[in-house]
Amino acid sequence: MDLLSSLPAFLLAVVLISASPGPAMALIVRRSALRGFRGAVPTVLGLEAGLYVWALAAAAGLAALVAASEVAYVVLRIVGAAFLVYLGVKAWRSALKKQPAEAEHLEEDVRPARWWAAFGEGALVMLANPKAAAFMIAFYPQFIPADRPMFATTAVLALCQVALEIALYLTLAAAVGRAGAWFRKTKIRRRLDAVSGTVLVGLGVRMAAESR
């Protein structure tokens, strides 16, 4: 199998995986709806930074250790589930909180502290997901020729995945952000917070409850 010949199948698989509903999608939609396109950028970059770290860990064999260790897998799963529930409860509290009159205006905030907080939120959601480790172990070897170095080839493929997902997720953020004025109306915002909070809590509970 040649690497270039397998690349189209790899990219198609990435597109299909990226389009699947999950914590990443929920975070990006909520962030871009309430904070605009620029407000969603650090969340997307944080998610993809976490994904790239898992890809390199898989290539180095570290992800396999996490997946094989019952204790490490359960601990990571509980941490990830707890963080998703925390984000969901935070969204619920926002839905119940009385919004100021200016809440319907654009809330893009690019201050460094807010930027890095959103980046860290995205990275932690990805890094605290043990399913990401198991996925990387199973996914990348299918597209790596036997005569290619595992680590270097995984790093290149992961870069392709990160670049493609950033483009896809930023396109989604831009589309949602264009309707931001509607989403930021007080009633709509509360409903969005309530729905996104429920989705995040549900994902967290499912992550905590599911087995390997």
Image (tube, grey):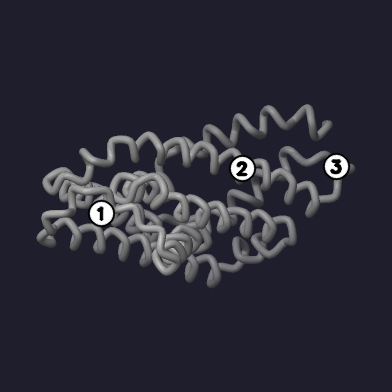
Q: Do the numbered discs 3 and 1 sit on residues whose CB atoms are within 8 Å?
A: no
Disc 3 to disc 2: CB gap under 8 Å: no
Instruction: Give the x, y percent position of residue 107.
Output: 29, 53
Looking at numbered disc 2 in the image, what kind of residue is underneath it?
Ala
Question: Residue 16 versus residue 133: which sits nearer the camera?
Answer: 16
Q: Which quadrant of the figure contains the N terminus?
A: top right
Q: CA distance from mark 3 to mark 1?
A: 45 Å
Q: Residue at x 18, y 53 (%)?
A: 103
Residue 186 appears in the picture as rendered: yes
* C-alpha span from label 3 to label 2: 25 Å
Residue 84 pos. (x, y %) = 36, 60
Please state if 189 lies on the left or on the right of 27 as rendered. left
Residue 21, image x, y percentages: 40, 40
Q: Amino acid at mark 1?
A: Gly
Find disc 1 in the rendering and name its residue: 197
Task: Give the CA separation, mark 2 to mark 1.
Answer: 28 Å
Q: Amino acid at mark 3?
A: Ala
> Image point 80% across, 35% down: which residue?
3
List x then y, in percent, for residue 59. Answer: 73, 56
Q: What residue lies at 59% left-to-right and 38% top-to-bottom?
A: 164
- The residue beneath circle 3 is 146
Q: Secondary structure at mark 2?
A: helix
Between residue 110 and residue 29, name the one nearer to us. Answer: 110
Q: Which residue is mark 2?
A: 163
The total number of labels drawn is 3
Residue 207 numbered mark, or none: none
